[in-house]
Amino acid sequence: MNPPKFILILCGLIALGSCSKTNTIFKDYNCQTESIPTKPVLDAFLKFSLEIPKNWKTELYIDQGTSIFATADTTKQLSEAFLLKVSQIPGQLILNQATTDIIKGELTKNLWQINSIQNGVFKKFDALLINTQKNTSNKKISALHLYFGFGSEHYFEIEIQCFGDKNTDERYCQAIKIINSLNIKE
């Protein structure tokens, strides 16, 4: 016995809807980036990895239980590259208005001007993306700050920094491609 067509269509729509909810946080960034050779790099605690371009410099740090992963293309001028910092921080992050206000306060305290705030999903977790900028004595710095909880023991803070005004969206897209390669060891 064949199932009625409307059930098949309904199942298809549900499947499409659930796929689109797996990574909605970057929906405003229509990115088309070229493929480049990468290598997986693990953090210092061996809890997560990213696919990093082979010629990039990556530094790993540990600070009071926080694993910090910083990487950049050191073959380019700072105004043509971006800095990417991924931190896995101990503790639980519950994204609500109070948490958002605390994060905004910390960013403002560090002289970031908030341009936009967006809620969404990243790697099936509730996420917060904040677009900021600040002017230093020498350059304008644009940044994306991504926050998402990972269970009750850790959360992630990911920051992309672009120096200057040149090709900022393109550099964000390159960074988003790397961020999307995040593999969390459970």
Image (tube, rainbow, N blue to C red):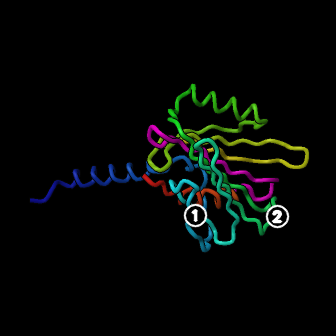
Secondary element at image label 2: loop
Q: CA distance from mark 1 to mark 2?
A: 23 Å
Label number found at residue 41: 1
Q: Is 166 included in the stretch rendered in magenta?
A: yes
x then y, percent, for residue 167: 75, 59
Q: How far across and how far down the image is residue 93, in percent?
A: 52, 35
Q: Quadrant of residue 115?
A: top right
Which of the pair 84/141 is nearer the observer? 84
What label sits on residue 77 in the rendered view? Answer: 2
The magenta-colored residue range is 149-170
Count of numbered circles in the view: 2
Front tag of 1 and 2 = 1
Answer left or right for 115 relative to 138.
Answer: left
Mark 2: amino acid: Gln
- Left or right of 78 in this view: 124: left
At 48% across and 54% down in the image, what residue appears? 184
Name the residue rendered at 84%, 43% in the picture. Answer: 135
Residue 9 % position (x, y)? 27, 53
Residue farthest to the right, as pictured: 137
Tag 1: residue type?
Val
Position of residue 161 in the picture relative to residue 158 (left or right): right
